[in-house]
Image (spheres, rainbow, N blue to C red):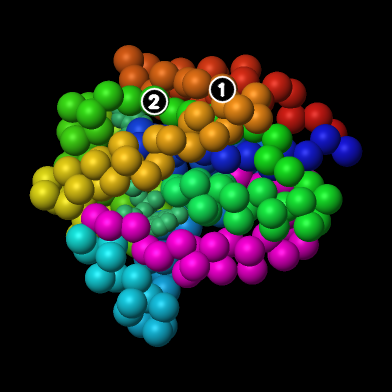
Amino acid sequence: MTQFNLILLGPPGAGKGTQASRIVEEYGVPHISTGDMLRAAVKNQTEMGIEAKKFMDAGALVPDSVVIGIVKERLQEPDTAKGFLLDGFPRTIPQAEALDEALAALDRGVTKVIALLVEEDELILRLSGRRICRACQAPFHVEFNKPAKEGVCDVCGGELYQRDDDNETTVRNRLEVYRTQTEPLISYYDAQGLVSRVSGTGNTPDGVYTQIREALGPAGE
Ligand code: ADP
Ligand code: ADP
Ligand code: ZN
């Protein structure tokens, strides 16, 4: 059985969440977004959520030990047997190393890394106009990806909101963190021959997805 052990890598605002829903639908793998999981912990005011919120509000990374723990636990779930789509993880070299070790212990490995690339000016426009569904986390944009009805999710009818960290100051920090801590992962996975680079600009979300599909190949059985 072909496994789809996938990583969606790219700067904040590149369109990872937007593309993730398309990938998981076609390839039948679960969407594992550490950002969504952390926001759920913040909302439920768990001990981890309260701690994580400080880092998230500052546009900094939550400590490696915390996110590595969350992902390792999630990868134990039976729905990951055929594969998974990691979105927003790994974000540092230690996270990537921990993932490689955890998968090796399960006799598995990452099979493909999609690097979704968008330049910085565009990222700022995307993040400052982003709106998220409170219920299903689907991302929209006030100009580039408008919902049919303002403030309402097309997918589930939930209420749209603006994330606390999608303000200009925090966005600049997040982009800096991406450049210094996360971008080096492209070389890390290039060394394993796993990276497909996809341009996330100058194209509709469906147009971008067509290229991702080509990089991933047929979904199989
Ligand atoms: P990420 O998960 O990488 O942070 P999102 O999927 O949330 O990114 O997308 C960031 C913002 O950009 C959202 O407001 C989304 O609607 C918008 N967006 C996504 N893809 C495109 C695209 N191809 N063109 C224009 N805007 C896009
Ligand atoms: P985006 O793709 O828009 O940057 P995410 O939803 O992936 O946003 O992440 C939001 C915030 O959650 C990050 O700025 C960071 O504080 C925290 N976070 C998410 N994933 C990780 C991770 N793998 N390591 C550390 N912090 C993370
Ligand atoms: Zn929704």
Across and down, in percent, residue 62 comes to: 37, 63
Residue occupying the far right of the picture: 1
Instruction: Report the span colored magenta.
Output: 59-85
Q: Would residue 78 be counted in the magenta stretch?
A: yes
Q: Is residue 11 above or below residue 173?
A: above
Quick check: 134 left or right of 126? right
Q: Earlier in the sequence, mark 1 or mark 2?
A: 2
Q: In the image shown, does 62 or 43 lie closer to the viewer? A: 62
Instruction: Check disc 2 and report the residue beneath it.
Output: 117
Across and down, in percent, residue 216 comes to: 66, 25
Q: Can you see residue 140? A: no
Neighbour tally class for label 1: few under 14, some 14-19, many 20 plus, Cα within 10 Å: some
Instruction: Check disc 1 and report the residue beneath it.
Output: 196
Residue ID at (34%, 58%):
61
Q: Is residue 118 above or below residue 3?
A: above
Locate the C terminus and report the quarter of the image it occupies: top right
Q: Which amino acid type corresponds to the residue marked 2 in the rendered image?
A: Leu
Locate the N terminus and report the quarter of the image it occupies: top right
Residue ID at (48%, 21%):
198
Q: Quadrant of ligand 1?
A: top left
Quick check: 32 left or right of 17? right
Q: Secondary structure at mark 1?
A: strand
Across and down, in percent, residue 164 comes to: 20, 60
In the picture, the disc for residue 65 is none
Q: In the image shown, does 84 or 108 lie closer to the viewer? A: 108
Quick check: 45 left or right of 37? left
Residue ID at (57%, 40%):
7
User: Quick check: is the Cβ at mark 2 less than 8 Å away from ligand 1?
Assistant: no
Q: Can you see residue 122? A: yes
Across and down, in percent, residue 166 comes to: 20, 50
